[in-house]
Image (cartoon, coloured by chain):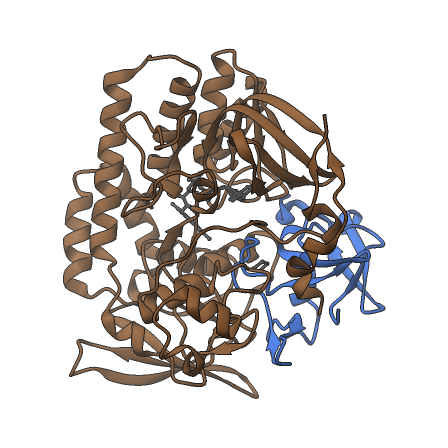
């Protein structure tokens, strides 16, 4: 789980809302989401009242980083490690 | 709405889940849980350690860390204790049975004794704009950066309270972020008194100074954010500095606002087990025993005091749970010193009463259900507000807004109700198999 020690060989590709996103192996899904080019403000999802939201606690408490991962709804992406071929949906 | 899984559960059919007997269950694999498990397994006990996180280490040793952290994790692995990562306590049944959710499903654990080492979480204070993406916890930013979030070239304003802010400032510099400032709500008098107190603990002084050099010139004591807004080019944070009545306000632009107001102990598991809660956290005696027979508590969940407190309390409880009385005088003295340090922390970083007034009527307090402060004024307690506004009813189960309403309205949390973490509907009504 040390993102610093990854190299190109240690890169995985996940599908985020159908778009391929490359990320170093060992990263969390939350990291892969906020590191996407264009996710400048670290938005991951929208709230019940349709406001943009991003991660808050980074440790599984707040659920603000949640997304559907490989069909499992409400996964806390800050607690899930990226895997090659993983499918993430941020609109569920 | 899928967020409501919790309420639909009652109508789902009951299924059975396997039951696993363990001699000693340690809940939490941070420094405290690791120290406890290592000591007990070293004394020949059969130990299972569970943690919600994908790897052991807790908050401070997340994703590896200093050599001491790696040694501690290696010692745990060598001790014979079994570690079950990605496993969280969902519910507590009769006779100290715990219902847990892990990567392979749900199961009941039937431990002979339990050491609760659930650590602490950040305390958040709501202020206008704090729900914007890019506003994260201070420890939150630390955790996110350690799991790979890239802050190179980003302007980061660190704010809130507590020694953690300095560590976060140092991490920002180390990872190529641009540290705008560290706004610490405690004023310079309190900080100076605290620094003098550290002289009595040389290790802590070195730690504080080592961090301080990298970030010290950016420290703004007596300062806190009052509002944040998003602009085309990032965030703009209004910061108030100075004592009440003569404060000055200024705008600081940044890309990320990392803001946390100290830590609060995670007492949910202990409370579900029926343990008494004291002023600082889970109540424990001098041997780390809680008010419930066979249940110990260690580390930040008994009172926020830093990693040394977690380590010595963990070791003491591990030995006691294994039925050993060894190492008494030294270990007990270490525990006493660590608890004294915790009390000093608490005093230094007490929150300024002005922080309770930052939220205006439109400021969201409950982020899960988007409940604003204006809707909560007028209620007298958390329970009443929860029934009528859905505050605290979302997936975080009040872990975030519960501390917010504590700061703003002075409300205490109500009883712990299962599930402690949200689970799929089918899992909730699971009863123990034979
Ligand atoms: C976000 C954050 C950042 C911090 N950064 C620093 C730092 O840089 N330097 C420093 O000196 N101190 C830091 N601290 C303080 C730190 O908590 C302590 O120094 C040390 O990590 C405490 O160890 P612990 O074992 O008591 O608790 P933790 O390290 O918090 O470990 C508790 C563990 O219990 C697990 N847990 C909680 N509830 C459950 C449940 N229901 N089921 C299963 N598992 C559960 C958690 O996942 C966690 O891994 C930080 C604290 C926080 C909250
Ligand atoms: S950021 Fe809070 S749960 Fe993931």
Query: What residue appears at the point 34 percent right and 71 percent down from the top-left corner?
Result: B380
Q: Can residue B124 be seen here?
A: no
The picture places residue B379, in percent across and down from the top left corner, at 37, 74
Residue farthest to the bottom, as pictured: B232
Identify which residue, B241 or B352, lies in the foreground.
B352
Q: Is residue A43 above or below residue B81?
A: below
The picture places residue B334, in percent across and down from the top left corner, at 26, 28
Place residue B138 in its image quadrant. bottom left
**A36 to the left or right of B325:** right
Identify which residue, B263 or B411, lies in the foreground.
B411
Chain corresponding to blue in the figure = A
| Quadrant of the rendering where the C terminus of chain B is positioned | top right
Q: Is residue B19 above or below residue B231?
A: above
Which shade is chain B? brown
Identify which residue, B269 or B325, lies in the foreground.
B269
Q: Can residue B288 be seen here?
A: yes
């Amino acid at each position: 789980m040390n993102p610093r020690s990854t190299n190109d060989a240690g890169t995985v590709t996940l599908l985020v809302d159908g778009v391929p996103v490359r990320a170093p192996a060992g990263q969390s899904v939350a990291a892969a989401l906020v590191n996407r080019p264009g996710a400048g403000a670290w938005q991951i999802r929208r709230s019940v009242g349709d406001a943009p939201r991003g991660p808050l606690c980074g440790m599984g408490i707040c659920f603000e980083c949640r997304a559907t991962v490989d069909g499992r709804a409400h996964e806390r992406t800050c607690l899930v490690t990226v895997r090659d071929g993983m499918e993430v949906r941020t609109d569920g | 709405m899928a967020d409501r899984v919790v309420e639909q559960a009652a109508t789902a059919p009951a299924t059975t889940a396997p039951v696993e007997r363990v001699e000693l269950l340690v809940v939490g694999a941070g420094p405290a849980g690791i120290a406890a498990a290592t000591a007990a397994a070293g004394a020949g006990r059969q130990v299972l350690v569970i943690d919600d996180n994908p790897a052991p280490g807790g908050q401070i040793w997340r994703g590896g860390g200093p050599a001491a952290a790696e040694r501690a994790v290696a010692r745990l692995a060598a001790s014979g204790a079994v570690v079950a990562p990605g496993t969280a306590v969902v519910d507590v049944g009769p006779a100290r049975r715990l219902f847990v959710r892990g990567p392979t499903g749900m199961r009941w654990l039937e431990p002979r004794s339990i050491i609760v080492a659930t650590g602490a979480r950040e305390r958040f204070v709501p202020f206008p704009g704090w729900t914007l993406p890019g506003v994260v916890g201070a420890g939150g930013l630390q955790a996110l950066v350690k799991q790979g979030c890239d802050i190179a070239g980003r302007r980061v304003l660190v704010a809130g309270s507590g020694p953690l802010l300095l560590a976060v400032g140092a991490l920002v510099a180390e990872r190529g972020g641009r540290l705008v400032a560290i706004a610490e709500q405690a004023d310079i008098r309190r900080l100076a008194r605290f620094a003098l107190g550290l002289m009595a603990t040389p290790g802590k002084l070195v730690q504080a100074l080592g961090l301080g050099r990298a970030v010290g010139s950016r420290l703004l004591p007596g300062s806190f954010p009052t509002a944040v807004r998003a602009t085309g080019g990032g965030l703009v944070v209004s910061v108030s500095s100075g004592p009440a009545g003569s404060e000055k306000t200024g705008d600081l632009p940044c890309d990320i606002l990392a803001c946390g107001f100290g830590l609060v102990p995670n007492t949910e598991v202990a409370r579900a087990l029926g343990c008494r809660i004291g002023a600082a956290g889970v109540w424990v005696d001098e041997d780390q025993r809680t008010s419930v027979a066979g249940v110990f508590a260690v580390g930040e969940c008994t009172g926020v005091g830093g990693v040394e407190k977690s380590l010595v309390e963990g070791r003491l409880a591990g030995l006691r749970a294994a039925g050993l009385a060894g190492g008494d005088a030294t270990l007990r003295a270490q525990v006493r010193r660590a608890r004294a340090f915790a009390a000093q922390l608490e005093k230094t970083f007490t929150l300024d009463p002005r922080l309770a007034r930052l939220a205006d009527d439109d400021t969201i307090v409950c982020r899960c259900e988007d409940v604003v402060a204006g809707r909560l004024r007028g209620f007298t307690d958390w329970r009443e507000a929860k029934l009528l506004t859905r505050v605290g009813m979302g997936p975080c189960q009040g872990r975030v807004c519960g501390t917010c309403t504590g700061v703003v309205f002075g409300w205490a949390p109500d009883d712990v109700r299962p599930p402690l973490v949200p689970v799929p509907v089918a899992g909730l009504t699971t009863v123990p198999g034979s």
